[in-house]
Amino acid sequence: MNMDLRSGNLYWPSVDEQPPVFSPLASDVECDVAIIGGGVSGALAADRISREGRRVVLVDRRNVCTASTPASTGLLQYEIDTPLTELTELVGRDQAQRAYLASHASLMQFRELVRGLDNYCGLIDRQSLYLSCEEDDYDELDAECTARRELKLEVTLLTPAELKKRFDIDRPGGALWSASAMEVDPYRLTLALLRRAVRSGTAIYAKTEIATYDPTPTGVTLGTNDGHHIRADHVIFATGYETPQFLEQNLCELNSTYAMASQRLTEAELSVWRDKCLIWESGDPYFYARTTVDNRVMIGGEDDEFTDPDKRDARLAAKCKTLVDKFKLLYPSIDIEPQFRWAGTFATTKDGLPLIGPHRQFPHGYFALGYGGNGITFSLIAATIIADQIAGRPNADAELFQFDR
């Protein structure tokens, strides 16, 4: 069943190229690896595995890059939604530290990944500011800063006075400054990855829905709604927020989230936004902000704990107004209005970590579920781990993100 994953006037498809239209599967095929899902998670997996010389078939029940990926705002961070101090309490010090280091290592891989594509996909190195909301947040940020510095991560605790002097932002509990962050155009990234995967031999089929999953001792036969079959040694599920519909496990909490992009602004208008750093905050409901390569302000958050698409869409205008009001508290001199507004489904796990690897319900199957605020970073981790698992190579990070962790 297709979920109504996003709605509104999406920014990326409006300013970028349109995805190629692939034909449905019209005959039986065989491959080493079948990938279900043509968003950024499926594209990263297809690119990685096909470049290792394996025969890959990727299918999508829609067309590629038309589900959740176009609704992503493309913030790339190593920070996990769960702060390191809290994650330590949830999963233990060793596991928490390794998860943060794995996320940081994945973030650093994006430069090399994009360097080999046919365009840079809007990838830009940025700094990151994690803002307090209350005066009491300062002690928590101090502890978080200490925990990250133990891992040699470049992070600085800013007092309210230092935050005001350096970034001209008023927050009663200061902020954490991180040197390592990036922004990207997730739509262009996905299409560029798929193009390279095709050049490496990947076959892509759109409007092809998988109806049956029949494992054998040596592989899987996938049956489509049109009666065709894909015989694969391995299957990767890059099925995003629709996965809870068929996986018999309490995976995540699904919410609705909102975003907007402003009109184009001048460099002079944006000059008060020092270094165009990524901004996010500790509050609930969530808020974050970035700029785009064409000098727009992109902001998002204001999550709701429901996924009803009608209810979500009815709130879109009011939610975007709230986002604008929050932004104006940060930068009163930057006058913005929504030119693009959209809403979509968003998932979080109990510990803020992704779900990656095999699941007992689907023999020979692997899941790449980058749930969380830094889902694209998680999806690159997933592509690496699953490629290693398929090849029989050890991967020390796999246990951090497995289903039965």
Image (spheres, rainbow, N blue to C red):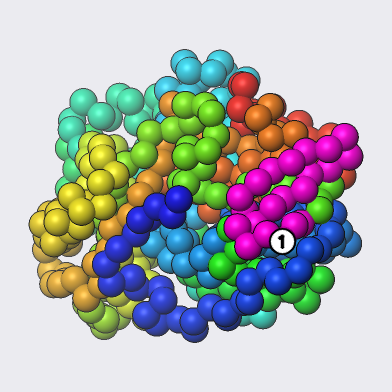
Residue sitting at x 36%, y 39%: 254
Element carrying mark 1: loop
Residue sitting at x 84%, y 47%: 233
Vertical side of 49 occupied by 13: above or below? below
385 magenta-colored: no
The amino acid type found where label 1 is placed reads His
The magenta region covers 210-230
Vertical side of 111 occupied by 211: above or below? above
Q: Quadrant of the C terminus?
A: top right
Quadrant in the picture for residue 85: top left
Give residue 328's position: percent from left, percent from top. Answer: 13, 60
**84 to the left or right of 205:** left
Residue sitting at x 45%, y 81%: 16
Give residue 144's position: percent from left, percent from top. Answer: 42, 29
Residue sitting at x 68%, y 27%: 360
In the foreground, 113 or 252: 252
Which residue is the site of mark 1?
228
Give residue 141's position: percent from left, percent from top. Answer: 35, 31
